[in-house]
Image: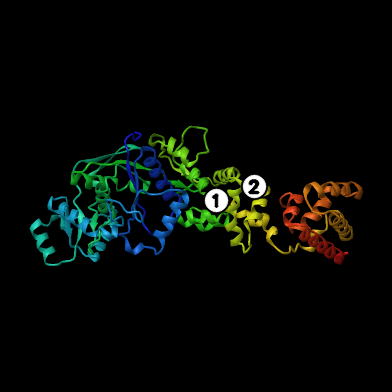
Amino acid sequence: MTATKPVRVRFAPSPTGHLHIGGARTALYNYLLARQTGGQFLLRIEDTDRKRFVEGAEEELKNSLRWLGIQWDEGIDVGGDHGPYRQSERKAIYQEYARKLVADGHAYPCFCSAERLERVRTEQQKNKEIPHYDGTCRALSPEEAARRVAAGESHVIRFKTPKEGATTVRDLLRGDITVQNSTLDDYILVKSDGLALYHLAAMVDDHLMGISHVIRGAEWLATLPLHCLIIRAMGWNEPVWAHLSVFLKPSGKGKMSKRESADLIKDGHSIFVKDLADLGYLPEAVVNWVALMGWSYDDHTEIFSMADLIEKFSLERLNPSPAAINFTKFDHFNGVYIRSLTVEDLAQRIQPFFEKAGLKADMPTLLKIAPIIHERLAGLDEAPEIAGFFFRDEVTPEAAELAAKNMTAAQSAKVARDAHAILSALPEITPALAEPPMRSYVEQSGFSAGQVFGILRIAVTGQKVSPPLFESMEIIGREKVLARILRAAETLEGLA
């Protein structure tokens, strides 16, 4: 069902680490649906698990979303009518609803110690049973439970899951999901410190914040029946549920996990959004790439701007099948988007990479360089490697590399001397002025263009592969070019 009315959707991550591409995709799909329908996209922080809280994770999360071009209408930073938007600031709200569930007979206080629960679990495992709460405190009378709570006895609040019948929930991607209630546990809703767990907190928040569609990861499918039972026990309307496909490793074998990221970095890839910017990826490419891992418009269209996605995204075309992460496709998208940039935009985007490499890259020079490296870049991070020589006072190629293939050092030195003489006679070094006499020299010298220009390329750029030689010379400037060629000649003469 495609939403026709304005939706209210949310992205509700936990600040427990870096935002990965799975989270980015969840945020993106929610954002697209909100923009498409003229609805609202909320950013809510689910930080009740204080043991896993990571300092700085929330700030990085916001920066990553904004880098991708995803902005929220309500939530942390921007506020709204349904705050606070951090669960750690909503403790009293959850306790109120927990008390209501207890009063209505849908939940109960549990006074079992951690030691007793561990003994029960161990015994169940010995008997080859699925570990579950054995219901000791479920059997307490409401009066006794209330008395023990009033006496200050430590306790948690558990949901009183129905033990008879079945629970059916409709997932937009998978249809009806039915589970026997006898297989469900009495999950903890509120811990002994009074902090609510996700199961209660998220359902309360979604209700109070008016969330119409819950688009989230497939990891929540296992507890979806519990979440629906909580909503039904409260007498609330259920949102539309859509649980997205899981990401598989690039091999297609096994679920992708955060632990694999260290190995990916060695190959210039990552599953963390913050790394992708540093690795030279454009946010436009990231958005296009993750959008197509779980959704498609048709069987042939691949390139989608954010505006295209907002127009064409639909819930019906979400695919529940696992999606293998394809970094080759990602690199392809990145190249496409780099080549679509204007010269000015490309210059601005590569400047930070030169600075990171310790090179003072001024904008006027970058605007000259951008057109001649535009087609060569697969990632923005490659710019300093390809074009760093423009911003160095000197280049220091290996002496052995200066000698051309099938030429002695003495022959190569003579070519460098001759080129220096030809170019120094010119009023300026431009392709129009420098290339014709150098090509005439190639014809007269008896050496190939590859040999002659190869010597010049390494002398001037310090690299065997570089942007177009004469265009590069013009940007470097006459004085520097001549000095570099002269230095190369002297180095080669030292080998002769």
Residue 235, by quadrant, is top left
Q: How far across and how far down the image is residue 245, in percent?
A: 41, 43
Relative to 335, 398 lies left or right:
right
Q: Residue at x 52, y 45 (%)?
A: 326
Q: How far across and how far down the image is residue 287, in percent?
A: 48, 45
Question: To which residue does mark 1 refer?
Answer: 281
Q: How far across and how far down the image is residue 378, in percent?
A: 61, 48
| Along the viewing direction, whichever of 387 and 132 lies nearer the viewer | 387
Which numbered disc covers residue 374? Answer: 2
Mark whose residue sits in front, 1 or 2: 2
The disc, 1 or 2, on the residue closer to the chain's N-terminal end is 1
Amino acid bearing label 1: Tyr
| Along the viewing direction, whichever of 119 and 319 lies nearer the viewer | 319
Amino acid bearing label 2: His
Q: How many discs appear? A: 2
Q: Quadrant of the N terminus?
A: top left
Q: Residue at x 19, y 55 (%)?
A: 98
Which numbered disc covers residue 116? Answer: none
Relative to 126, 394 lies left or right:
right
Disc 1 versus disc 2: distance between alpha carbons? 14 Å
Q: How far across and how far down the image is residue 194, in percent?
A: 22, 62
Q: Could you say whether the residue bearing mark 2 is in a helix, strand or loop?
A: helix
| Along the viewing direction, whichever of 64 and 243 lies nearer the viewer | 64
